[in-house]
Amino acid sequence: MNTHSAQPANNRTLTVWDPLVRIFHWSLVICFVIAFATEDDWLYLHSFAGYTIVGLLLFRICWGLIGTRYARFSSFVAGPTGVKRYLKSLFSRHPEHHIGHNPAGGAMILLMMLLLLAVSFSGMATLATEGLGPLAGTFVAGWSEDWLEEIHEALANLMLLMVVVHVAGVVVSSLLHHENLIRAMIDGRKRQPKEPQS
């Protein structure tokens, strides 16, 4: 009896995610969990996690410009047309397979990065109203603290929703393409298609 009959015919793999991308990804996950869990308490830990997120995002922006092939934005930012085409392919019998991030995943990454920057800025602006943090003494220090806190909390909750959508997308994509994307973000390796599309 062949116990491997359910496996894809092509078992070749290649390294896609370099160590820096993987470290960035899981560090960001840990820091966001810490920041979200300490939102109302442990201000020092909350702020430290937030500053670390900013540092991670700045690194990822740089690495997205000069990093390895599949880390660069140019390899996965496809624009609205590419995202629409990929999403339509999910409902067909032959969904597009991308070695790196698919267009929908790439769009989600950009949205999440922008949202995290907004969350971080609103958090630092809130601290500035109390004379704390790197924005203290700047024009944002005169803004309403209550208003900034509400914005910061709303953006953080929206980010949590984005995380849920992201995880759901990873699960659906893993099932449709018969590959474990979570494991790929741990060991860096993905299945190589016979005729790679990207």
Image (spheres, helix red, strand yellow):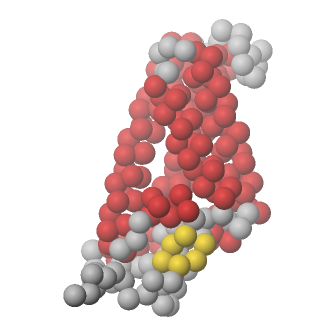
Pinpoint residue 109: horizontal percent, then vertical percent: 53, 54
Quadrant housing residue 87: bottom left
Image quadrant in which the N terminus is located: bottom left
Question: Horizontal placement of 104 versus 117: left or right?
Answer: left
Q: Residue 54: in sight, yes or no?
A: yes
Above-or-below relation of 6 to 137: below
In this view of the protein, can residue 107 be seen by the observer?
A: no
Query: On the rendered structure, is 132 left or right of 177?
Result: right
Quarter of the C terminus within the rendering: bottom right
Q: Quadrant of residue 50?
A: top right
Report the front residue among 41 and 144.
Answer: 41
Q: Is residue 130 above or below residue 60?
A: above
Q: Position of residue 111 (x, y in %)?
A: 52, 50
Q: Residue at x 74, y 54 (%)?
A: 62
**Vertical side of 23 occupied by 29: above or below:** above
x 55%, y 70%: residue: 189
Q: Residue at image x 52%, y 47%?
A: 112
What is the residue that sits farthest to the front in this orientation?
1
Q: Is residue 163 above or below residue 37?
A: below
Name the residue at the left extreme.
Answer: 1
Residue 45: % across, % down: 60, 21
Residue 136 or residue 23, whichever sits in front: 23
Judge left or right: residue 8 versus residue 133: left
Identity of the residue drawn at 37% across and 67% down: 174
Q: Residue furthest top?
A: 130
Image spot of residue 73 (x, y percent): 64, 64
